Image (cartoon, rainbow, N blue to C red):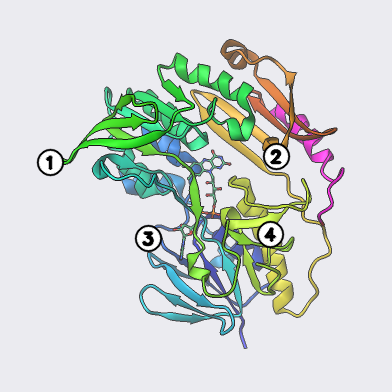
Amino acid sequence: MRRHILIVGASLAGLRTAEQLRSFGFDGAVTLVGAESYPPYNRPPLSKDVLLASSDPATALAALALRPKECLADAAWKLGVAVQSVDLAARTAKLADGEAIAFDGLVAATGLRARRLPLPGGERHRYTLRTLDDAIALRARLRPGVQVAVIGGGFVGCEVAASASRAGCAVTVIEPLAAPMQRAIGPELGQALQALHEAAGTRFLLQRSVAAFETDPREGSLHGLRLDDGSLVAADIVVEAVGSQPNVEWLGGNGLDLGDGFLCDHHLAIEGRAGVVAVGDVARFPNGFADAVPRRIEHWSIPAVTARRAADHLARYLSGRRPSEEPFAPLPTFWSDQHGLRIQSAGMPSLGTRIEVLSGDLTPDAMRRSGMALGYWRGDRLIGVVAVGLAPAQFVPLQARVAAGAFEGGDAK
Ligand SMILES: Cc1cc2nc3c(=O)[nH]c(=O)nc-3n(C[C@H](O)[C@H](O)[C@H](O)COP(=O)(O)OP(=O)(O)OC[C@H]3O[C@@H](n4cnc5c(N)ncnc54)[C@H](O)[C@@H]3O)c2cc1C
């Protein structure tokens, strides 16, 4: 009988897994189910070019589209409908439109959704950014002179701030930590990048959090944000860039740990269950690059590497072969674009306990002129590197240095 693999989530990770299944020789049926009505598209431009483009949704989608390879010509696509529940013991899934689908192998590729602050008010003026629809709705409000308050100074918050400031908006970023992007890259580089944003007119309110949305309930208008120190930040619109939540609820009721994405082993099998894998942002997996601790990694590079590993596992499982003995130790890489400068990261800088300048210096002028790079050490090991404004040819050897240390002290397979 022809085997059937159901892929839940039809975005980057789901698409790449489908393609990899074919490359590992799986010739059974593949079905991709996606809650969004769009075919797979690229998310990184949503906080960058898409917020500055003046195109309609169809043109924006055409520019972002991830085109499936020829090997998926016979795959079945069900878009605009979510998987509501799955019974892993019975190997069946139930869709929101009532359809039931039986499967032999399951891929969880459901990614994340934007978190929102649990505070009432100002609904018509509050935005998050995860989907194309989110970006198009936000873009319509980014007009010269509009006061934009961005809650959260992480990467998405800073990219939105840069785009809004380029669109002529008056931007304020409110961030509880002492520097933007601090959790990912440390306070020194966070402060240096803050200076770049400030030079473009963006205001930062650091070590502050939002206590309330100040609104006029009769008119439904927003005055601004009341902060924890009692001050008021005037705002026409608010972007909540306060992190994201894994989409895991649809696999509830199967006795799984759904605490932070799907807990996987080093084959990406969810809690070691054969034939059930997770990929991309929603997968929490041990990475031999660092250690045995399972972590989720929200980088664009991760869907491709997890897809390859998970597809290998599924193809072997469905043809009765043993799992791969190969170690799984992909090098995480990440980039961001802010105010015309590219930030590139390799490894896991957030695990570093000591930071040193590897080249250049942290002043905005120097970063623009010749670029800079920071090394992040965990003990004696270079665990990550972050560069700003560095040419790709200069970044590649640094990346190789980080990759070269991959198994020093690593105890995961
Ligand atoms: C605004 C933004 C900017 C970014 N910029 C960068 C960047 O500059 N550099 C970088 O390295 N990374 C960046 N990223 C991260 C990168 O885009 C993600 O890591 C990547 O998109 C993850 O892909 P995924 O397929 O795992 O998840 P997603 O892209 O989130 O896709 C999951 C899909 O599953 C669907 N789904 C959810 N639940 C269900 C269900 N029950 N049934 C069916 N379908 C479901 C969702 O609707 C969604 O379409 C950015 C992300 C965002 C949001």
Q: Quadrant of the N terminus?
A: bottom right
Q: Which residue is mark 2?
A: 348
Give the spatial CA distance, label 2 vs label 4. 21 Å
- 404 is within the stretch colored magenta: yes
Q: Position of residue 148 (x, y in %)?
A: 33, 29
Q: Position of residue 115 (x, y in %)?
A: 44, 48
Alpha carbon distance from label 1 to label 3: 35 Å
Q: Are marks 4 and 3 in contact (CB under 8 Å)?
A: no
Marks 3, 2: nearer the viewer: 2
- Marks 2 and 1, how far apart in space? 49 Å
Q: Residue furthest bottom?
A: 1
Can residue 295 be seen?
Answer: yes
Say if 119 sits above or below 373 in the image.
below
Q: Residue at x 82, y 60 (%)?
A: 326
Comes first in the chain, label 4 or label 3 = 3
For ligand 1, tell me if the residue under mark 1 lies within 8 Å.
Answer: no
Can you identify the residue that label 4 sits on? 308
Q: Amino acid at mark 1?
A: Arg
- Do the residues under discs 4 and 1 have CB atoms within 8 angstroms? no
The residue labelled by disc 1 is 218
Label 1: few (<14), some (14–19) or many (≥20) C-alpha neighbours in 10 Å: few
Residue 412, position as x, y percentages in the image: 81, 54
Front position in the image: 10 or 329? 329
Secondary-structure class at tag 4: helix
Quarter of the image with the C terminus is bottom right
Q: Residue at x 38, y 25 (%)?
A: 172
Asked if disc 2 and disc 1 are in contact, CB closer than 8 Å, the reply is no
Q: Which residue is mark 3?
A: 37
Q: What's the magenta region?
A: 392-412
Q: Indicate which disc, 2 or 1, sits on the residue closer to the N terminus.
A: 1
Q: Secondary structure at mark 3?
A: loop
